[in-house]
Image (cartoon, rainbow, N blue to C red):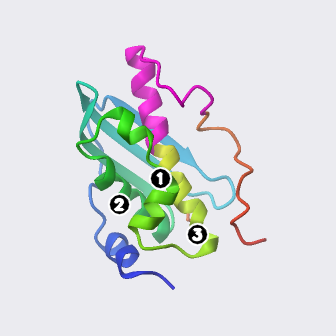
Amino acid sequence: MYTEKVMDHFMNPRNVGEIENADGIGEVGNAKCGDIMKMYLKIENDVIVNVKFKTFGCGSAIASSSIATEMIMGKTIYEALQLTNKAVVEALNGLPAQKMHCSVLAEQAIKSALLDYANKKNIDLKGLEDFNPHADHHDHDDEAPE
Ligand code: FES
């Protein structure tokens, strides 16, 4: 059911933890499953020089956040902003359909942390104007009915 890549990142998650004095912190949750993800970014000259995460959630959420941290490390905030949950799923070589929302959490946690940074620095991050990490997302067509 899970790819080797998912199992690898679930069993040995990369970049777990917190960053003291992080420049951007994002926290998102999924109301349905109750899982929570926190993302910490250290940013210098708009480049992500360090990233750590804490996920209180399922294995797919842990694997998604782990691989997502690898994907944005060393990237500019503008590049990180482009990271989609689809790209996360591709990097994991796939997730079961009912686990797609776990990858959405990773995308949102990063966006939420970027937004936090942008707000502190007064940067206008294009594409984030309408992003509300605490909005109730109804676009979970990919979830199995409960
Ligand atoms: Fe909710 Fe995975 S089951 S994040």
> Tag 3's secondary structure?
helix
In this orientation, which residue lies closer to the viewer: 47 or 137?
A: 47
Q: Please state the horizontal and vertical placement of residue 13, each as a whole percent of the image.
A: 31, 65
Q: Residue at x 63, y 38 (%)?
A: 134
User: How packed is label 2: few (under 14 Cα within 10 Å), some, or many (20 or more)?
Assistant: many
Mark 3 sits near ligand 1, with its Cβ under 8 Å away: yes
The tally of labels here is: 3
Element under label 2? helix
Q: Which numbered marker is on residue 106?
A: 1
What is the CA distance from the residue labelled 3 to the residue labelled 1? Answer: 12 Å
Q: Which mark is residue 62?
A: none
- Image height check: is 107 above or below 103? above
Determine which residue is flagged by label 3. 99
Q: Earlier in the sequence, mark 1 or mark 2?
A: 2
Task: Check residue 67 in the rendering and tell me which mark sits there, or answer none.
Answer: 2
Disc 1 vs disc 2: Cβ atoms closer than 8 Å?
Answer: yes
| Left-right relation of 93 to 1 | left
Instruction: Give above or below for 140 relative to 107.
Output: below
| Residue type marked 1 | Ala
Residues shaded magenta: 110-131
The amino acid beneath tag 3 is Lys
